[in-house]
Structure formats: structure tokens, C-alpha cells
Image (spheres, rainbow, N blue to C red):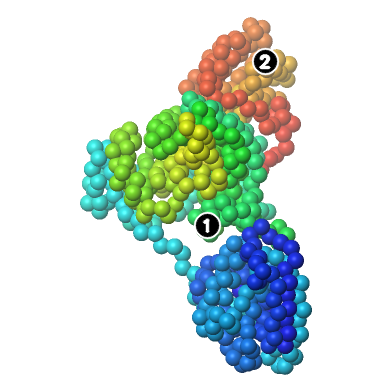
Amino acid sequence: MRLLLIHANEFWYKVRERAVDEADEVTADNAEKSFKNVLVVFTTVEEADEQNVDEVVRNAVDEVVQVFRNVNAKYVLVYPYAHLSSSLAHPKAAMGILEKFRQELAKVLGENIVYRAPFGWYKEFKLHCFGHPLSELSKQITATSKARGRIIEKKYFILTPDGKLVKPEEYNYTDEEFRVLVEKEVFKKELEGGQGRVYQYLRKFGFEWEELSDKGHMRYEPHATVMLEAVTQYSWRVASSLGIPVFRVRGTNMFNLKAEPIRRHAELFGERMYEVRMDEDKFILRFAACYQQFAILKDWVLSYKDLPLGMFEVADSYRYEQSGELVLGFRLRKFFMPDLHILTRDLEEAKKIALKVREKIVEEAKKVGREYLAIYNVTEDFLNTHFDYIVELVKQEGRPVLLTVYPAGIYYWVINVEYIIVDELRRPREIATWQIDVGNAMRFGIKYVDENGSEKYPVIIHTAITGSIERYIYMVFDTIAQNEKNGIPPSLPLWLSPIQVRIIPVSPEHLDYALKVAQALIEKGFRVDVDDRNESLGKKIRDAGVEWIPYVVVVGEREVKTNTINVRIRREGVQKSMTINEFIELLEKEMQGYPKVDSALPLLVSKRPTLPYLRQLAES
């Protein structure tokens, strides 16, 4: 808080026009006032003051009271003045702090002594300063101690599929991965650091930190770009496969903290919010797609007949993670979240839809070759009134879950489920999630009309079925890393492979036929390149293996004469001779249910410069 204290012989002000939406009510009593022998306290409430209001106000009161008594003033006027700092508090917060400041001064000096000019209005004023040594003073008021973060008392249990609640310290751990999860979450066991094979894989395929940006921001080279786009398109397919209408939207990533629902929602995330200042406003970069989708949904005219419905966006999302906790491809400050929100009529319908969401989350992990562990975060009131439902969910998980019980009413959700893998370095990693939200529809003004014509607030399911785009790719690479430890050669699924087919002509005379084969595959939407370099056949085949290319097609004199191709299948470690149509049929079958994404590289390998990540591929 910043103060400019003027001991005035005379001071007069008059309200002219509104300056901000959040403003004090102007009445006949406060619209215009004049004082004699008054200590005018021009006051700017700063952003930091919101974190420790009581102490800041107490320190400000002490300063003003001391000056008031030293100059022997008759009145004190607290005058809102936003020009003493560039770091302003939210208008609503500032208004509350100013009134608290006035009230605390009045407790010491008297109600008939202390006044406050209206906040949020342009005002004209006349000032006659006494001019003595103490008549002009400036003060910066801070808290003398650090603001304390909100401490939330949580209770931990192990909940088994047969409905038994067991204290974590009393549970018999037969699942090593589950024990690792509980030790980290409940007993706060420190995990070893280090970089495993996933880190190497990510860099090998062009996922890198961007050193010219803020920490935690990535860049995506051509191979990485293809993978990112493939998972992005696939996440939409998954979201729209739940059997309910889903609408795909796009939006902005920046929202003004002056908006009350944004401010209140942002307060739940505290220091993890990414903030940007523009002109005199403060914005947050979105945590996920919530703000944009809710802003759209509040303007829709919805009937009970429209529900349930979903809204989906792959949102560029921002979280101010601690720099020491950043993990390439997993814990980022900027990432892509395939965020789905499902509006349901009430809690009972939300519970039914959530069962389908849970099933889809588990199904997608199994396609990658993983089984999730789960953390069930629930509010105490939801646990007490819906215990049988929670047990039903855990029964479907088929294994115990870590149950974390929160006090009621501190968050907008009643149940929030995190799905976890334990990675190659034995570290728990959250991938997918869903939650049931009972608070944000009212906060953002999202309504529907029920059968009786009454307006109701829907219950909202939040979910990222595949997890963030980067985390999904992290899980794929981690699965490959763990398979490799067991002697399985590394390979990507066809739909995710940056290059799906490489065609290698045995000699330059066979290049035209190689290009003909490539064109036939490209027309069907497959990612193909042709290695036309002046290298030996053996080196070309080895280089294709370095890039984990699933299918390598070699064409020579025999293939040209018979109009066939020789296909090397990486996954099976075999070679097969087949026609182009037979090969296309094989690829189509393997791609069933997955998106086709264009290549991000030129067709001819000889036309590519020595890209750093491709050099890493060659050297690995």
C-alpha cells in the first residue's frame, strides 16, 4: 500500500464520472465534501496487499494515526488514488481494503473524524496544503511478515474395490507401483532425480526446451510437430466418441482479472497462475480451456433437452511451475490441453456420465499398453453421502486407490480423480483426469431451463481423457523405454510415427519407380519419404532404423519388373514382397481409428539440411 499524506488547511472534492465497473455507490452524502484542517491520505492499494490484508491495514493505521496526532489535524480523509503505483490490486479487493482501512482508523480516532471518498470514480478536487515540514509525507506500507499460504487439512486412506478404508500406514502393499505412489503422496518421500531414456527419446524426435523463452516452454521440430498434431487430432476423436453431442471451439488464452468469475476461480490456483500486465490491467494466461468454454456457454440458450453436451478445445495452457520441477515433455509452463467440459442436468446425471468418462480414460491407456493407478480426491461431504458410488468406481478400477479427503466447500469440485503411471525412473506421473464441478456454472452464469421452465445451473464434468498432448506422448515414450529394458526393440505406433514409410531405391535408376510408389501412398494420406542420397543401401536401411520408421520399402530391378515392393516391417523384424495395393491395405488396417496427419518434411531425404535433432538421431 502506498500513501501520500497531505495536511491541508482546506480540501474539497466532487464526483464526476465512473472510472471502473467495480465502484462504490455514490450518495448525496459522499458525492461532494469539503474539510478544513484535514489529513488527506491519498491511498493506492497494491496487488501484494491482497495477500496479507490485516497486517498491511494495521501498519497503515499506525502510520496515519502517528502523523494525524503530530500535525494536530481535525479530520482524516482516505482518498483512493491509483497513481502512486503500477502494481494495482483488483478493483473489488482494493475497495474492500480501503473500507477496512477507514473502519480501523475510525476505531482509533472516532467515526466522526474519519471519512472516505468513493472508490472507482473520477473526481475533481481543490487542495490548500499548510506547507509546514510534516504537511507532505509519503509512505510505503508492507506486511512485516510473509503472507501464509492456505493450509488445507487432508486425510488419506486406501480404498479397496470391496469398499474397505485402510490407513496408508496400516495397508499391506503387494503392488510395488502403488506403494511408490503412496510413499510420494502421503509420506512425502523424496524421489531421485535424473534423466532417463524418455528424455533421450524426446530430444531424439525434436522435443526441446526453447532457451529464448521463459523456462518451461518447448519447441517442436518437424518430427515432434507431426506427433503433436496427430495426438491433437486423436484427442478430438476420443472426446467425440462418448455418445453425447460435443462441440469443438477455439478461444483466447488471456483473461482479465477484473472479471469477477475469473478472479475468484484464479484464486484457487494461487502462485501457479501465469500473469501478464498490459496497460493498467492484469491478465492471467489460462490454466486450461475452462475460462473460454465457460464464457461461450454462458451465452448459449440451453434447455434440459440439450443436456448432456460437451465442449472441447485443445487449449494452449499455462502453469507457473517451479523451475526446479520442470521436466521435458511432462511438467511444463506452457503446454496443450485437450480439455472437454460436459454439462449435465444434475449431480446424478454427472455421476452416470463420469462412469463413461472413466471407462474411456482407462481404455485409451490400455491402447498404449499401460494400466493406471488412481488418486481419488473427494470432499468430506461427498464421501459421506456418495460412498457407494465411489466404491463402484473403485470396483471398476479393479485395484485399490489412494483416497484423499478434503474439507467441504474449499474447491468447486466434489470429486477429482487423477490417473497416474509410474515411469521408468519409478516416479509417479499424472496423465489423465476428470472431476465433477458443482460451483463454476453459478460463478460464470451458465444456465439451462428445466421441464418446468425454471432456470437451473448445470453440473459440469471436466476431463482430459488422454491427458495433455505432451504428457500422452511422454507416456508413449515411457512405455517404449520400459519395453526396451525387457528386450523389446523401440518402435512407435504407426499413427504416431513421424515418417511411416521410407522408400529406398537400390540405385538412381530406380528413383522414378520409388517416387511412383511414394505418390500412391501419399494420395492415401500416409507420411512417406524417399531416400535418394548417394549412400550405400546398408547405410540407408540403418538410418531408417535409427528413426524407428515402421516400414522400409526397398525397390530395385526385380520390383520394377514385377510392379511389386519389398517391405521391411520393423515391429516383426521380417521382409515381405507385396503389391502396392496389398501394402496400402496393410497400412489402412493398422491406421483404423487413428487420424492421418501430413508430413512436416520434404519428400526427398537429400533435400533436408543437417537438422540438429536429426543429427542426434544419426548419432544415437
As shown in the figure, which amino acid type bears the numbered disc 2?
Ala
Task: Look at 72% across and 88% down and name the residue there.
Answer: 9
User: Could one spot residue 177 in this view of the protein?
Assistant: yes
Q: Quadrant of the C terminus?
A: top right
Q: Name the residue under label 2.
A: 520
* Above/below status of 11 relative to 583: below
* Mark 1 surroundings: few (<14), some (14-19) or many (≥20) residues within 10 A: few
* Mark 2 surroundings: few (<14), some (14-19) or many (≥20) residues within 10 A: some
Side of 263 where 16 appears, left or right = right
Q: Which of 22 and 364 is in front in this view?
A: 22
Task: Look at 60% across and 36% down and name the residue there.
Answer: 300
SS at circle 1: helix
Depth check, mark 1 against mark 2: the one in front is 1
Q: Name the residue under label 1.
A: 267
Q: Quadrant of the N terminus?
A: bottom right
Q: Nearer the viewer, residue 517 or 92?
A: 92
Task: Look at 52% across and 29% down and name the residue there.
Answer: 306
Label 1 – label 2 distance at C-alpha: 55 Å
* Above/below status of 154 relative to 344: below
State the image coordinates of residue 44 (x, y, percent, origin top left). 65, 72
Q: Sequence-wise, which precedes: disc 1 or disc 2?
A: 1
State the image coordinates of residue 162 (x, y, percent, origin top left). 24, 37
Task: Look at 73% across and 85% down and name the residue there.
Answer: 10
